Amino acid sequence: MIVMIDYEAGNTCSVMNALDRLEVDYVLSDDVTTIQKADKVIFPGVGHAGAAMDALKRKGLVDVIKGLTQPVLGICVGMQLMAEGSEEGDTSCLGIVSGKVKKFESQVDYKVPHMGWNTVQHDGGGLFQGLPENNYFYFVHSYYMPVGDSCIASCNYNHDFAAAIKKDNFWGIQFHAEKSSKQGAQLLQNFLKEAS
Amino acid sequence: MLTKRIIPCLDIKNGRTVKGVNFVNLRDAGDPVELAKKYAEVGADELVFLDISATIEERETIYDLVKKVGVEVDIPFAVGGGINSVEKVSRILQNGADKVSVNSAVVRRPILAKEISDEFGAQCLIVAIDARQVDGSWMVHTHGGSKATELELFDWAQRMEELGAGEILFTSMDHDGTKNGFACEALAIMNEKLTIPVIASGGAGNMDHFVDVFTSGKADAGLAASIFHFDEVAIPDLKEYLVSKQIPMRV
């Protein structure tokens, strides 16, 4: 069973719609046992990192997520929360991957939020199997994870940043695959294919 | 490289698209969901639904529409028209929209922008501004451009950015409907003054107007309605043309 973590993330509905379009069976849950027993876990996220961590704490899910051993996909803030911390509200995060999430500096040609369709440099494997080099994914974010050890795909906006990460059973994508047309659907499909 | 965005705008009344739409191979041009799907398929980067319903009863139909669009359409979309409270924003977003667009309501009560931004994040808040030149100054108008305010366009846009807008959708009333091109001069000034993305609206008549709006107007996105609805400019052709002019596009 695929379980999506229910902690009132802003894009929950959009991710559910995307999974429905893929005709995937899933449940939306904040129940510890249900999440722990899942074959795969989707960890959505839109909004303030601090508020998101507070919601996870309130639901008693911080250690549950850190302890998961099945494949987990964090989306946007879901990915950012995997870092040690975030400059957004000076938040202490899950610490699954090393490094700290930083804020984009706005400049005339680099407005913040980084909003719209951008290209991702990837190696064509794993999550990005079957996706062309000339790809486009939809991004909306003011904070970014710097390129580090866990980075498996990068994007450029004024400078390079991590578009996707992987550490052990944890994957993260900064862009909104659920809103990225056919290529986004392909990526979600790639993540889900390895499940069950 | 971040691409510039092409955004068709669909006017909705009582759950149906109102402006005449002339699209080949569309079973029901009055059905916003069908039209939205079509636009997503041909490469629109985002969609805006503007509810121009006159009555409260008619306005209720927007939530159902948002739900249907969210299920069927796999690109981001915004909803505007009559949104005047955090509660309404919440209902629109919970039904599956990515963004809301507010206009008159924030002129009446500017702090609403901050309330929405604090609650749901700046990324979901578009502040739409209608303005026209009055004695050489760009002045904000409300109620579809019919009512003048004391607000100066650039000051107002900056204030909205400070209060938490994630994007500004600027419609020039002087250019809207003329098909003579966008208000590139004003857009370029706005781009200098703001650190958030600007969506340009009003005046699109041909493909060169989009070249201008992204080069001299420095806009981040271009919005249009009738030229797309009447198939005067096809989005794939437009994007190909813009790419040939070295403008980054998702193709």
Image (cartoon, grey):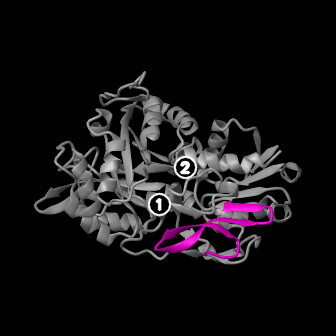
Percent x, y for residue B134?
Answer: 14, 58
Relative to A157, say whether B13 is above or below: above
Instruction: Tell whether B104 sits left or right of A180.
Output: left
In percent of width and height, residue B111 lies at 44, 61
Residue at image position (62%, 46%) is A186
Relative height, residue A144 to residue B173 (above, below): below
Say whether mark 2 and mark 1 are on the same chain. Answer: yes
Q: As rendered, which of B126 and A85 lies closer to the eye? A: A85
Quadrant location of the C terminus of chain A in the rendered image: top right
Camera-near label (1 vs 2) is: 2
The numbered mark at residue A58 is none
Q: Which residues are magenta?
A: A147-172
Q: Which quadrant of the figure has residue A13?
A: top right
Q: Is residue A154 magenta?
A: yes
In the image shown, does A67 or B147 lie closer to the viewer? A67
- Element class at badge 1: strand
Q: Quadrant of residue A9?
A: bottom right
Q: Earlier in the sequence, mark 1 or mark 2?
A: 1
- Type of the residue with mark 2: Ser
Helix, strand or loop for the magenta stretch, by majority: strand
